[in-house]
Image (tube, rainbow, N blue to C red):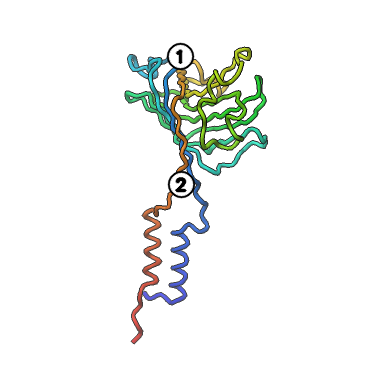
């Protein structure tokens, strides 16, 4: 079959537009957050059941973890001092070593960034992020995440997603007199698992509760990949073939 010039031009336009993503949603850069530290609390009524006897993470043991954030995720909260980023976080993971790795499943994730936020205690800066992870144990819910809390009101520049963080500003020694409030600065990893959720879906405590102090933190921005996928290459090839030489009419 021989294509007319008009048909060939239409094919080229369609193939190249599809290959180049014209009319498709733009992909955003990814902010990748990686951290590690030391376990400060390992508690719960079902630790042996969840991890297996002799395989429970130990106090002062180490952990690593992390998650991704889609740059450009809209703030879902009109409050100028507190941003809510539900749905923008992904790829949560925490690794306690010895095969005890938990990674995110398709499920709930949430993040908040607050600068000069008023609360039940003194004004503070806070960054929290957590997501649902798979457990393979038949438990109804497991999650991991981070909490960074400081009473130094310059710890976070604004309520945008942090692209850098000074961990020293989240130390109790640098947060003033907080003991009267019963609240301390935090730079914590959290992991919780619940075998059966109660009527309150936020009741995830009591079965497995693990906390760790974050001592290492890396935040990097990963540009959106421009490497073409196989389908893109095929469409580009089709367009180039349509532009290829034709036989001269006799």
Judge whether 138 appears above or below 12 on screen.
above
Q: Where residue 145 sits: x, y (%)?
A: 49, 27
Residue sitting nearer the eye, 13 or 98: 98
Mark linked to residue 176: none
Mark toward the start of the polypeptide (1 vs 2): 1
Residue that numbered label 2 is attached to? 223
Q: Where residue 76 sits: x, y (%)?
A: 62, 38
- For label 1, the crowd category at 10 Å Cα-Cα, with few meaning under 14, some 14 to 19 and many 20 or more, is some
- For label 2, the crowd category at 10 Å Cα-Cα, with few meaning under 14, some 14 to 19 and many 20 or more, is few
Judge whether 199 appears above or below 115 on screen.
above
Query: Residue at position x 40%, y 62% from top?
Result: 236
Residue sitting nearer the eye, 250 or 88: 88
Mark linked to residue 44: 1
For the C terminus, the image quarter is: bottom left
Residue at the extreme bottom of the image, as rendered = 250
Q: Where residue 187 sits: x, y (%)?
A: 51, 24
Judge whether 240 appears above or below 122 on screen.
below
Local secondary structure at mark 2:
loop
Q: Residue 222, located in which quarter of the rendered image?
A: top left
Q: CA distance from mark 1 to mark 2?
A: 41 Å
Query: Residue at position x 37%, y 63% from top?
Result: 237
Query: Residue at position x 47%, y 70% from top?
Result: 10
Query: Residue at position x 65%, y 24% from top?
Result: 123
């Amino acid at each position: 079959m021989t294509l007319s010039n008009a048909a060939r031009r239409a094919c080229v336009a369609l193939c190249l537009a599809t290959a180049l993503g014209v009319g498709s949603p733009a992909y955003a850069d990814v902010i990748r957050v990686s951290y590690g530290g030391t376990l400060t609390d390992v508690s719960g009524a079902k630790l042996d059941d969840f991890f297996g006897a002799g395989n429970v993470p130990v106090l002062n043991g180490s952990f690593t973890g992390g998650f991704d954030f889609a740059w450009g995720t809209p703030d879902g909260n009109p409050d100028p001092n507190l941003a809510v980023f539900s749905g923008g976080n992904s790829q949560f993971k925490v690794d306690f070593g010895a095969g005890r790795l938990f990674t995110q499943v398709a499920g709930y994730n949430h993040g908040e960034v607050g600068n000069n936020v008023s609360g039940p205690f003194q004004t503070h800066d806070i960054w929290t992020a957590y997501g649902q992870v798979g457990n393979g144990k038949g438990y109804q819910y497991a999650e991991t995440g981070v909490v960074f809390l400081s009473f130094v009101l310059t710890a976070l520049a604004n309520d945008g997603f942090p692209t850098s963080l000074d961990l020293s500003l989240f130390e109790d020694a640098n947060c003033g007199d907080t003991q009267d409030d019963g609240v301390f600065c935090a730079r914590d990893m959290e992991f919780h698992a619940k075998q059966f959720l109660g009527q309150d879906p936020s009741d995830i405590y009591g079965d497995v509760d693990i906390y760790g102090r974050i001592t290492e933190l890396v935040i990097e921005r990963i540009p959106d990949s421009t490497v073409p996928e196989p389908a893109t290459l095929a469409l580009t090839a089709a367009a180039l073939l349509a532009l290829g030489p034709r036989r001269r009419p006799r």
